Image (cartoon, rainbow, N blue to C red):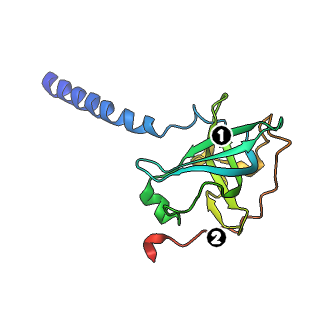
Amino acid sequence: MTRKLVGLFVMALGFLTICTPMFAHHGTSGVYDFTHRITTKATVKEYKWANPHVQVYWTLKNDKGEEETWGIETVSPGNALANGWTKRSFKPGDQLLVSFVPAKGDRTFGTCTQFVFVADGMRLGGNGRCGMGAEAVEMNTLPVKPGYTAVEVKMPKDDRTRPESEQEK
């Protein structure tokens, strides 16, 4: 009986050891400030189509008119394709309206990003709902982060349509 309990304990400990880092990899509650948002005009600076996550960097101006570079890490390239993104979705110099939840503290990156291209009104990114389950928030109802209120722009109404998946063409 003792031998079975020890074996069960070792198996459970091994399972927890393997699974804990897997859950920690995508933890967001300690990183992002889900009590504020930033919605502003921005200019694409860099677009990285790479594993494990596609990244987009842009410049924006704060309330003081100072230019800042912000970025996001999105989904994998495969999931990005399924959501209508391609290697050429963003180009340096593209003008955007961007809305996102910033990281906590003074870190210049965010999550739950919605992009609208100024040139043609095409929309990429999420639907404004951030997080999972009961803890999810509607980003559009969050107050603007202090220091970014003067640059607040009105995002066009989201009709929930997104580009067709590249995988289905």
Q: Which residue is mark 2?
A: 161
Residue 41 in the image: x percent, y percent?
75, 51
Q: Along the line of sight, which residue is nearer the eye, 91 or 152?
A: 91
Residue 149 in the image: x percent, y percent?
84, 41
Q: Name the mark nearer the viewer: 1 or 2.
A: 1
Q: Is residue 62 left or right of residue 96?
A: right
Residue 86 in the image: x percent, y percent?
50, 63
Which corner quadrant holds the N terminus?
top left
Count of marks placed on residues:
2
Q: Which mark is residue 120?
A: none
Q: At label 1, which amino acid type do we have? A: Thr
Q: Is residue 110 left or right of residue 19?
A: right
Residue 54 in the image: x percent, y percent?
49, 51
Q: Residue at x 57, y 47 (%)?
A: 132
Is residue 121 visible in the rendered image? The answer is: yes
- Occupied quadrant, residue 167: bottom left
Residues packed near mark 1 inside 10 Å, few (<14), some (14 to 19) or many (20 plus): some
Above/below status of 105 relative to 114: above
Q: Is residue 119 left or right of residue 28?
A: right
Q: Which residue is mark 1?
A: 69
Q: At label 2, which amino acid type do we have? A: Thr
Above/below status of 108 relative to 129: above
Does dot 2 land on a helix, a strand or a loop?
A: loop
Distance from disc 1 to disc 2, alpha carbons, whole Å, reads 28 Å
